[in-house]
Image (spheres, coloured by chain):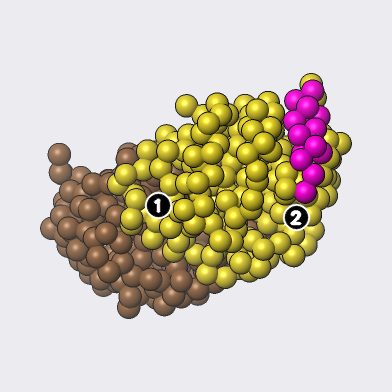
Chain colours: A yellow, B brown
Protein backbone atom coordinates (compact mmCIF):
# COMPACT_ATOMS: atom_id res chain seq x y z
CA UNK A 1 0.00 0.00 0.00
CA UNK A 2 1.36 3.39 -1.03
CA UNK A 3 1.22 6.05 1.68
CA UNK A 4 1.68 9.14 -0.43
CA UNK A 5 0.57 11.30 2.48
CA UNK A 6 3.92 10.55 4.10
CA UNK A 7 6.01 11.61 1.13
CA UNK A 8 8.11 14.76 1.37
CA UNK A 9 10.15 14.41 -1.81
CA UNK A 10 9.44 12.78 -5.15
CA UNK A 11 11.24 12.62 -8.49
CA UNK A 12 9.14 12.75 -11.65
CA UNK A 13 10.51 11.03 -14.76
CA UNK A 14 9.15 11.76 -18.21
CA UNK A 15 8.82 8.74 -20.54
CA UNK A 16 9.52 11.09 -23.45
CA UNK A 17 12.97 12.06 -22.10
CA UNK A 18 16.18 10.05 -22.09
CA UNK A 19 18.02 9.08 -18.94
CA UNK A 20 21.04 6.77 -18.85
CA UNK A 21 21.22 3.77 -16.54
CA UNK A 22 23.70 5.34 -14.16
CA UNK A 23 21.62 8.48 -13.62
CA UNK A 24 18.46 6.44 -13.27
CA UNK A 25 20.09 4.33 -10.57
CA UNK A 26 21.23 7.42 -8.70
CA UNK A 27 17.70 8.86 -8.82
CA UNK A 28 16.06 5.64 -7.67
CA UNK A 29 18.60 5.07 -4.90
CA UNK A 30 18.70 8.71 -3.81
CA UNK A 31 16.50 8.29 -0.78
CA UNK A 32 13.54 10.00 -2.45
CA UNK A 33 10.16 8.74 -1.29
CA UNK A 34 8.90 7.73 -4.72
CA UNK A 35 9.31 8.06 -8.45
CA UNK A 36 6.37 9.29 -10.50
CA UNK A 37 6.29 8.48 -14.20
CA UNK A 38 4.46 11.16 -16.10
CA UNK A 39 4.62 13.72 -18.86
CA UNK A 40 2.47 15.85 -21.11
CA UNK A 41 3.41 15.07 -24.70
CA UNK A 42 4.37 11.88 -26.53
CA UNK A 43 3.64 9.60 -23.58
CA UNK A 44 2.86 6.16 -25.00
CA UNK A 45 2.32 2.64 -23.75
CA UNK A 46 5.76 1.66 -25.06
CA UNK A 47 7.86 4.41 -23.56
CA UNK A 48 5.93 4.13 -20.28
CA UNK A 49 6.42 0.38 -19.91
CA UNK A 50 10.09 0.72 -20.87
CA UNK A 51 10.66 3.23 -18.11
CA UNK A 52 8.67 1.15 -15.61
CA UNK A 53 10.80 -1.91 -16.36
CA UNK A 54 13.99 0.04 -15.76
CA UNK A 55 12.77 1.61 -12.50
CA UNK A 56 11.49 -1.76 -11.25
CA UNK A 57 15.12 -2.93 -10.81
CA UNK A 58 15.13 -0.72 -7.70
CA UNK A 59 13.00 -0.81 -4.58
CA UNK A 60 11.68 2.74 -4.75
CA UNK A 61 7.87 2.99 -5.09
CA UNK A 62 6.91 3.70 -8.68
CA UNK A 63 3.69 5.51 -9.54
CA UNK A 64 2.09 6.30 -12.86
CA UNK A 65 0.51 9.68 -13.41
CA UNK A 66 -1.99 8.86 -16.13
CA UNK A 67 -1.77 11.39 -18.94
CA UNK A 68 -3.73 9.52 -21.55
CA UNK A 69 -5.73 6.34 -21.79
CA UNK A 70 -3.39 4.76 -24.35
CA UNK A 71 -0.51 4.94 -21.87
CA UNK A 72 -2.18 3.16 -18.96
CA UNK A 73 0.29 0.42 -18.06
CA UNK A 74 -0.41 -2.19 -15.37
CA UNK A 75 2.22 -3.02 -12.80
CA UNK A 76 2.78 0.32 -11.10
CA UNK A 77 2.41 0.57 -7.31
CA UNK A 78 -0.18 3.31 -7.56
CA UNK A 79 -1.92 5.55 -10.09
CA UNK A 80 -2.55 9.28 -9.99
CA UNK A 81 -5.30 10.63 -12.23
CA UNK A 82 -5.03 14.37 -12.88
CA UNK A 83 -8.16 16.49 -13.02
CA UNK A 84 -7.21 19.93 -14.33
CA UNK A 85 -9.34 22.34 -12.32
CA UNK A 86 -8.60 25.39 -14.43
CA UNK A 87 -8.67 23.83 -17.89
CA UNK A 88 -10.46 25.95 -20.46
CA UNK A 89 -10.99 23.69 -23.46
CA UNK A 90 -12.20 20.15 -24.05
CA UNK A 91 -9.75 18.98 -21.38
CA UNK A 92 -12.07 20.69 -18.94
CA UNK A 93 -14.78 18.20 -19.73
CA UNK A 94 -14.74 14.84 -18.05
CA UNK A 95 -14.86 13.19 -21.46
CA UNK A 96 -11.34 11.73 -21.28
CA UNK A 97 -11.92 10.30 -17.81
CA UNK A 98 -15.23 8.81 -18.93
CA UNK A 99 -13.66 7.23 -22.01
CA UNK A 100 -10.93 5.75 -19.84
CA UNK A 101 -13.51 4.31 -17.50
CA UNK A 102 -15.39 2.85 -20.42
CA UNK A 103 -12.29 0.82 -21.24
CA UNK A 104 -10.93 0.06 -17.79
CA UNK A 105 -13.67 0.96 -15.30
CA UNK A 106 -14.52 -2.57 -14.29
CA UNK A 107 -10.84 -3.55 -13.87
CA UNK A 108 -9.54 -0.70 -11.74
CA UNK A 109 -8.43 -1.37 -8.17
CA UNK A 110 -9.64 1.89 -6.66
CA UNK A 111 -7.51 1.45 -3.55
CA UNK A 112 -4.53 2.08 -5.84
CA UNK A 113 -5.88 5.25 -7.47
CA UNK A 114 -6.11 8.86 -6.34
CA UNK A 115 -7.38 11.89 -8.25
CA UNK A 116 -5.12 14.94 -8.25
CA UNK A 117 -6.81 18.34 -8.42
CA UNK A 118 -4.35 20.06 -10.77
CA UNK A 119 -4.02 23.83 -10.74
CA UNK A 120 -1.88 25.03 -13.63
CA UNK A 121 0.05 28.25 -13.02
CA UNK A 122 2.60 28.62 -15.82
CA UNK A 123 0.96 29.88 -19.03
CA UNK A 124 4.07 28.95 -21.04
CA UNK A 125 3.99 25.29 -20.05
CA UNK A 126 3.03 22.55 -22.47
CA UNK A 127 0.25 21.41 -20.15
CA UNK A 128 -1.20 24.94 -19.99
CA UNK A 129 -1.32 25.12 -23.77
CA UNK A 130 -2.73 21.61 -24.12
CA UNK A 131 -5.56 22.26 -21.66
CA UNK A 132 -6.23 25.91 -22.50
CA UNK A 133 -5.63 26.66 -18.84
CA UNK A 134 -7.13 29.78 -17.32
CA UNK A 135 -4.21 30.91 -15.20
CA UNK A 136 -5.11 32.32 -11.76
CA UNK A 137 -4.77 36.10 -11.80
CA UNK A 138 -4.67 36.84 -8.10
CA UNK A 139 -4.62 35.18 -4.72
CA UNK A 140 -8.43 35.03 -4.62
CA UNK A 141 -8.43 32.94 -7.79
CA UNK A 142 -5.82 30.68 -6.22
CA UNK A 143 -7.79 30.21 -3.01
CA UNK A 144 -11.03 29.54 -4.91
CA UNK A 145 -9.37 26.76 -6.92
CA UNK A 146 -7.87 25.26 -3.76
CA UNK A 147 -11.27 25.29 -2.06
CA UNK A 148 -12.84 23.74 -5.14
CA UNK A 149 -10.48 20.78 -4.88
CA UNK A 150 -10.25 20.47 -1.13
CA UNK A 151 -13.68 21.38 0.19
CA UNK A 152 -16.19 21.18 -2.61
CA UNK A 153 -14.87 18.14 -4.47
CA UNK A 154 -13.00 16.73 -1.45
CA UNK A 155 -10.22 15.47 -3.68
CA UNK A 156 -7.39 13.73 -1.83
CA UNK A 157 -4.62 15.73 -3.54
CA UNK A 158 -4.13 19.32 -4.65
CA UNK A 159 -1.28 19.66 -7.18
CA UNK A 160 0.23 23.10 -7.74
CA UNK A 161 1.73 22.76 -11.21
CA UNK A 162 4.21 25.40 -12.34
CA UNK A 163 5.78 22.99 -14.86
CA UNK A 164 8.95 24.59 -16.19
CA UNK A 165 8.93 27.71 -14.02
CA UNK A 166 9.70 28.18 -10.36
CA UNK A 167 6.55 29.33 -8.61
CA UNK A 168 5.63 32.08 -6.22
CA UNK A 169 6.03 30.68 -2.69
CA UNK A 170 3.46 33.14 -1.36
CA UNK A 171 0.82 31.58 -3.62
CA UNK A 172 1.78 28.12 -2.44
CA UNK A 173 1.40 29.41 1.09
CA UNK A 174 -2.07 30.76 0.18
CA UNK A 175 -3.15 27.35 -1.05
CA UNK A 176 -1.77 25.80 2.12
CA UNK A 177 -3.76 28.28 4.23
CA UNK A 178 -7.15 27.19 2.88
CA UNK A 179 -6.60 23.44 2.58
CA UNK A 180 -8.42 21.43 5.23
CA UNK A 181 -7.91 17.82 4.23
CA UNK A 182 -6.09 17.36 0.92
CA UNK A 183 -2.43 16.46 0.52
CA UNK A 184 -0.51 19.26 -1.21
CA UNK A 185 1.94 18.59 -4.03
CA UNK A 186 4.16 21.28 -5.48
CA UNK A 187 5.91 20.78 -8.81
CA UNK A 188 7.69 23.09 -11.21
CA UNK A 189 11.05 24.67 -11.89
CA UNK A 190 12.95 23.47 -8.84
CA UNK A 191 16.63 23.74 -9.76
CA UNK A 192 18.44 23.31 -6.46
CA UNK A 193 18.14 22.35 -2.83
CA UNK A 194 17.23 25.77 -1.52
CA UNK A 195 14.26 26.07 -3.87
CA UNK A 196 13.12 22.57 -2.93
CA UNK A 197 13.36 23.44 0.76
CA UNK A 198 11.51 26.72 0.25
CA UNK A 199 8.53 25.01 -1.37
CA UNK A 200 8.65 22.18 1.17
CA UNK A 201 7.78 24.73 3.84
CA UNK A 202 4.24 24.91 2.43
CA UNK A 203 3.81 21.81 0.30
CA UNK A 204 3.52 18.37 1.85
CA UNK A 205 5.43 16.88 -1.05
CA UNK A 206 7.87 18.56 -3.42
CA UNK A 207 8.18 17.10 -6.91
CA UNK A 208 11.46 17.48 -8.76
CA UNK A 209 11.45 16.85 -12.50
CA UNK A 210 13.23 18.68 -15.32
CA UNK A 211 16.44 19.39 -13.41
CA UNK A 212 17.09 15.63 -13.42
CA UNK A 213 17.79 15.94 -17.15
CA UNK A 214 19.70 19.23 -16.89
CA UNK A 215 21.87 18.88 -13.81
CA UNK A 216 21.70 15.54 -12.06
CA UNK A 217 23.94 16.66 -9.19
CA UNK A 218 21.63 19.55 -8.29
CA UNK A 219 18.64 17.27 -8.65
CA UNK A 220 20.09 14.76 -6.20
CA UNK A 221 20.85 17.50 -3.67
CA UNK A 222 17.15 18.35 -3.42
CA UNK A 223 16.49 15.06 -1.62
CA UNK A 224 18.69 15.93 1.32
CA UNK A 225 17.50 19.55 1.39
CA UNK A 226 13.89 18.45 1.80
CA UNK A 227 14.49 15.41 3.97
CA UNK A 228 16.66 17.35 6.44
CA UNK A 229 13.86 19.83 7.17
CA UNK A 230 12.18 19.27 10.48
CA UNK B 1 -28.31 17.94 10.27
CA UNK B 2 -29.83 16.75 7.03
CA UNK B 3 -29.60 12.99 6.47
CA UNK B 4 -30.32 12.85 2.77
CA UNK B 5 -29.09 9.26 2.69
CA UNK B 6 -32.32 8.29 4.45
CA UNK B 7 -34.62 9.97 1.97
CA UNK B 8 -36.81 7.86 -0.27
CA UNK B 9 -39.05 10.54 -1.75
CA UNK B 10 -38.49 14.22 -2.44
CA UNK B 11 -40.50 16.95 -4.15
CA UNK B 12 -38.62 19.48 -6.27
CA UNK B 13 -40.12 22.94 -6.62
CA UNK B 14 -39.03 25.34 -9.34
CA UNK B 15 -38.76 29.01 -8.32
CA UNK B 16 -39.73 29.93 -11.87
CA UNK B 17 -43.09 28.15 -11.64
CA UNK B 18 -46.22 29.22 -9.79
CA UNK B 19 -47.84 27.20 -7.05
CA UNK B 20 -50.76 28.38 -4.91
CA UNK B 21 -50.68 28.31 -1.13
CA UNK B 22 -53.04 25.37 -0.84
CA UNK B 23 -51.04 23.16 -3.19
CA UNK B 24 -47.80 24.20 -1.53
CA UNK B 25 -49.18 23.21 1.86
CA UNK B 26 -50.30 19.83 0.54
CA UNK B 27 -46.82 19.20 -0.90
CA UNK B 28 -45.00 20.23 2.25
CA UNK B 29 -47.34 18.27 4.53
CA UNK B 30 -47.48 15.23 2.25
CA UNK B 31 -45.07 13.11 4.21
CA UNK B 32 -42.30 13.55 1.65
CA UNK B 33 -38.82 13.48 3.13
CA UNK B 34 -37.74 16.88 1.84
CA UNK B 35 -38.42 19.68 -0.59
CA UNK B 36 -35.67 20.70 -2.98
CA UNK B 37 -35.80 24.15 -4.52
CA UNK B 38 -34.18 24.16 -7.92
CA UNK B 39 -34.59 24.85 -11.60
CA UNK B 40 -32.68 25.47 -14.77
CA UNK B 41 -33.82 28.79 -16.21
CA UNK B 42 -34.79 32.12 -14.67
CA UNK B 43 -33.80 31.11 -11.13
CA UNK B 44 -33.00 34.32 -9.26
CA UNK B 45 -32.27 35.42 -5.73
CA UNK B 46 -35.73 36.95 -5.48
CA UNK B 47 -37.84 34.04 -6.69
CA UNK B 48 -35.70 31.62 -4.65
CA UNK B 49 -36.03 33.52 -1.38
CA UNK B 50 -39.77 33.99 -1.97
CA UNK B 51 -40.24 30.25 -2.32
CA UNK B 52 -38.03 29.54 0.69
CA UNK B 53 -40.11 31.89 2.85
CA UNK B 54 -43.33 30.15 1.84
CA UNK B 55 -41.94 26.64 2.43
CA UNK B 56 -40.51 27.67 5.80
CA UNK B 57 -44.03 27.87 7.21
CA UNK B 58 -43.90 24.07 7.29
CA UNK B 59 -41.56 21.70 9.05
CA UNK B 60 -40.36 19.78 6.01
CA UNK B 61 -36.58 20.02 5.38
CA UNK B 62 -35.90 22.53 2.62
CA UNK B 63 -32.80 22.24 0.45
CA UNK B 64 -31.45 24.51 -2.25
CA UNK B 65 -30.02 23.00 -5.40
CA UNK B 66 -27.69 25.76 -6.51
CA UNK B 67 -28.18 26.50 -10.19
CA UNK B 68 -26.31 29.79 -10.35
CA UNK B 69 -24.25 31.92 -8.07
CA UNK B 70 -26.68 34.84 -8.15
CA UNK B 71 -29.40 32.64 -6.66
CA UNK B 72 -27.50 31.43 -3.60
CA UNK B 73 -29.81 32.22 -0.72
CA UNK B 74 -28.86 31.65 2.92
CA UNK B 75 -31.27 29.97 5.30
CA UNK B 76 -31.83 26.60 3.63
CA UNK B 77 -31.22 23.44 5.64
CA UNK B 78 -28.73 22.09 3.13
CA UNK B 79 -27.24 22.85 -0.29
CA UNK B 80 -26.74 20.58 -3.27
CA UNK B 81 -24.18 21.68 -5.85
CA UNK B 82 -24.62 19.97 -9.23
CA UNK B 83 -21.57 18.93 -11.22
CA UNK B 84 -22.72 17.91 -14.70
CA UNK B 85 -20.55 14.95 -15.58
CA UNK B 86 -21.54 14.81 -19.23
CA UNK B 87 -21.63 18.52 -20.02
CA UNK B 88 -20.08 19.40 -23.34
CA UNK B 89 -19.67 23.16 -23.35
CA UNK B 90 -18.38 25.77 -20.92
CA UNK B 91 -20.60 24.22 -18.24
CA UNK B 92 -18.18 21.33 -18.35
CA UNK B 93 -15.44 23.53 -17.00
CA UNK B 94 -15.27 24.17 -13.30
CA UNK B 95 -15.32 27.90 -14.01
CA UNK B 96 -18.77 28.51 -12.50
CA UNK B 97 -17.92 26.59 -9.34
CA UNK B 98 -14.65 28.48 -9.00
CA UNK B 99 -16.36 31.84 -9.45
CA UNK B 100 -18.89 30.89 -6.81
CA UNK B 101 -16.13 29.95 -4.42
CA UNK B 102 -14.38 33.24 -5.10
CA UNK B 103 -17.47 34.97 -3.76
CA UNK B 104 -18.56 32.60 -1.01
CA UNK B 105 -15.71 30.18 -0.44
CA UNK B 106 -14.67 31.47 2.95
CA UNK B 107 -18.28 31.59 4.22
CA UNK B 108 -19.53 28.14 3.27
CA UNK B 109 -20.38 25.64 5.99
CA UNK B 110 -19.20 22.53 4.17
CA UNK B 111 -21.11 20.23 6.52
CA UNK B 112 -24.25 21.59 4.84
CA UNK B 113 -23.10 21.07 1.25
CA UNK B 114 -22.91 18.03 -1.00
CA UNK B 115 -21.88 17.80 -4.64
CA UNK B 116 -24.22 15.90 -6.95
CA UNK B 117 -22.66 14.10 -9.89
CA UNK B 118 -25.32 14.88 -12.51
CA UNK B 119 -25.79 12.62 -15.50
CA UNK B 120 -28.16 14.16 -18.04
CA UNK B 121 -30.15 11.70 -20.14
CA UNK B 122 -32.89 13.64 -21.93
CA UNK B 123 -31.50 15.53 -24.94
CA UNK B 124 -34.71 17.61 -25.18
CA UNK B 125 -34.44 18.98 -21.66
CA UNK B 126 -33.52 22.59 -20.93
CA UNK B 127 -30.58 21.47 -18.84
CA UNK B 128 -29.25 19.30 -21.68
CA UNK B 129 -29.38 22.24 -24.07
CA UNK B 130 -27.88 24.65 -21.54
CA UNK B 131 -24.92 22.38 -20.79
CA UNK B 132 -24.41 20.93 -24.26
CA UNK B 133 -24.82 17.51 -22.67
CA UNK B 134 -23.33 14.49 -24.37
CA UNK B 135 -26.14 12.02 -23.84
CA UNK B 136 -25.07 8.43 -23.02
CA UNK B 137 -25.53 6.22 -26.06
CA UNK B 138 -25.40 2.81 -24.46
CA UNK B 139 -25.18 1.07 -21.14
CA UNK B 140 -21.37 1.20 -21.21
CA UNK B 141 -21.50 5.01 -21.39
CA UNK B 142 -23.93 4.99 -18.48
CA UNK B 143 -21.74 2.76 -16.34
CA UNK B 144 -18.61 4.78 -17.13
CA UNK B 145 -20.31 7.98 -15.97
CA UNK B 146 -21.55 6.28 -12.81
CA UNK B 147 -18.04 5.01 -12.04
CA UNK B 148 -16.63 8.46 -12.72
CA UNK B 149 -18.88 9.93 -10.03
CA UNK B 150 -18.85 7.09 -7.55
CA UNK B 151 -15.38 5.60 -7.73
CA UNK B 152 -13.03 8.06 -9.39
CA UNK B 153 -14.38 11.31 -7.95
CA UNK B 154 -15.98 9.64 -4.92
CA UNK B 155 -18.89 12.09 -5.04
CA UNK B 156 -21.51 11.56 -2.33
CA UNK B 157 -24.45 11.65 -4.78
CA UNK B 158 -25.13 10.40 -8.30
CA UNK B 159 -28.14 12.13 -9.88
CA UNK B 160 -29.81 10.49 -12.87
CA UNK B 161 -31.51 13.44 -14.56
CA UNK B 162 -34.14 12.71 -17.16
CA UNK B 163 -35.81 16.09 -16.62
CA UNK B 164 -39.11 16.12 -18.48
CA UNK B 165 -39.04 12.52 -19.71
CA UNK B 166 -39.58 9.27 -17.89
CA UNK B 167 -36.37 7.30 -17.99
CA UNK B 168 -35.39 3.78 -18.84
CA UNK B 169 -35.52 1.74 -15.62
CA UNK B 170 -32.93 -0.69 -16.98
CA UNK B 171 -30.39 2.14 -17.23
CA UNK B 172 -31.16 3.21 -13.67
CA UNK B 173 -30.59 -0.39 -12.67
CA UNK B 174 -27.26 -0.34 -14.51
CA UNK B 175 -26.14 2.71 -12.56
CA UNK B 176 -27.25 1.02 -9.34
CA UNK B 177 -25.21 -2.06 -10.23
CA UNK B 178 -21.89 -0.22 -10.38
CA UNK B 179 -22.32 2.24 -7.51
CA UNK B 180 -20.27 1.36 -4.46
CA UNK B 181 -20.71 4.27 -2.10
CA UNK B 182 -22.74 7.14 -3.56
CA UNK B 183 -26.38 7.87 -2.83
CA UNK B 184 -28.51 7.54 -5.99
CA UNK B 185 -31.11 10.14 -6.95
CA UNK B 186 -33.52 9.62 -9.82
CA UNK B 187 -35.47 12.55 -11.27
CA UNK B 188 -37.46 13.05 -14.42
CA UNK B 189 -40.92 12.53 -15.87
CA UNK B 190 -42.58 10.72 -12.98
CA UNK B 191 -46.31 11.18 -13.50
CA UNK B 192 -47.87 8.71 -11.08
CA UNK B 193 -47.31 6.38 -8.20
CA UNK B 194 -46.43 3.35 -10.23
CA UNK B 195 -43.63 5.15 -12.06
CA UNK B 196 -42.32 6.51 -8.76
CA UNK B 197 -42.36 3.02 -7.27
CA UNK B 198 -40.65 1.55 -10.33
CA UNK B 199 -37.71 3.96 -10.11
CA UNK B 200 -37.57 3.59 -6.32
CA UNK B 201 -36.64 -0.06 -6.87
CA UNK B 202 -33.20 1.10 -8.08
CA UNK B 203 -32.79 4.67 -6.87
CA UNK B 204 -32.30 5.46 -3.19
CA UNK B 205 -34.35 8.62 -3.60
CA UNK B 206 -36.98 9.44 -6.17
CA UNK B 207 -37.48 13.11 -7.04
CA UNK B 208 -40.89 14.26 -8.23
CA UNK B 209 -41.10 17.65 -9.94
CA UNK B 210 -43.14 18.77 -12.94
CA UNK B 211 -46.23 16.71 -12.17
CA UNK B 212 -46.76 18.92 -9.11
CA UNK B 213 -47.71 21.70 -11.52
CA UNK B 214 -49.70 19.49 -13.88
CA UNK B 215 -51.65 17.14 -11.64
CA UNK B 216 -51.24 17.71 -7.92
CA UNK B 217 -53.32 14.66 -7.01
CA UNK B 218 -51.06 12.32 -8.95
CA UNK B 219 -48.02 14.06 -7.51
CA UNK B 220 -49.25 13.52 -3.96
CA UNK B 221 -49.90 9.84 -4.62
CA UNK B 222 -46.23 9.25 -5.39
CA UNK B 223 -45.36 9.79 -1.73
CA UNK B 224 -47.38 6.83 -0.54
CA UNK B 225 -46.30 4.68 -3.50
CA UNK B 226 -42.66 5.11 -2.61
CA UNK B 227 -42.99 5.11 1.14
CA UNK B 228 -45.05 1.94 1.19
CA UNK B 229 -42.31 -0.03 -0.55
CA UNK B 230 -40.40 -2.29 1.76
Q: Quadrant of residue A196?
A: top right
Query: Residue at horizontal 81%, vertical 50%?
Result: A166
Question: Quick one: SS at disc 1?
Answer: helix
The answer to whether residue A183 is visible is: no
A91 up-or-down from A183: above or below: below
The picture places residue B34, in percent across and down from the top left corner, at 36, 49
Residue B148's label in the rendered image is 1
Left or right placement of residue A27 versus residue A167 in this view:
left
Query: Residue at horizontal 55%, vertical 36%?
Result: A55
For the C terminus of chain A, give its image quadrant: top right
Specify the principal SS of the magenta part.
helix
Residue topped by disc 2: A164
A202 up-or-down from A170: above or below: above
Which circle, 2 or 1, is nearer the viewer? 2
What span is colored magenta in the figure? A214-228
B167 up-or-down from A32: above or below: below
Q: Nearer the viewer, residue A27 or A135?
A: A27
Query: Residue at horizontal 47%, vertical 27%?
Result: A1
The answer as to whether the residues below labels 2 and 1 share one chain is no
The answer to whether residue B129 is visible is: yes
Query: Residue at horizontal 55%, vertical 26%?
Result: A59
Q: Nearer the viewer, residue B5 or B90?
A: B90
**Measured Cα–Cα span from mark 2 to mark 1:** 30 Å
Residue A224 shown in magenta:
yes
The picture places residue A143, in percent across and down from the top left corner, at 72, 50
Amino acid sequence: MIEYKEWRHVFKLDPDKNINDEDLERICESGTDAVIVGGTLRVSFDNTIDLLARIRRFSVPCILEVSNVEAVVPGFDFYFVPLVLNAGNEYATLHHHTEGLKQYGSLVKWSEVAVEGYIIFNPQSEVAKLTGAKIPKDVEDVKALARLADQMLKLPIVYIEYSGAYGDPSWVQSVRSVIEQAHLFYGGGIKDGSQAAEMAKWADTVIVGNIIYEDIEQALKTVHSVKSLT
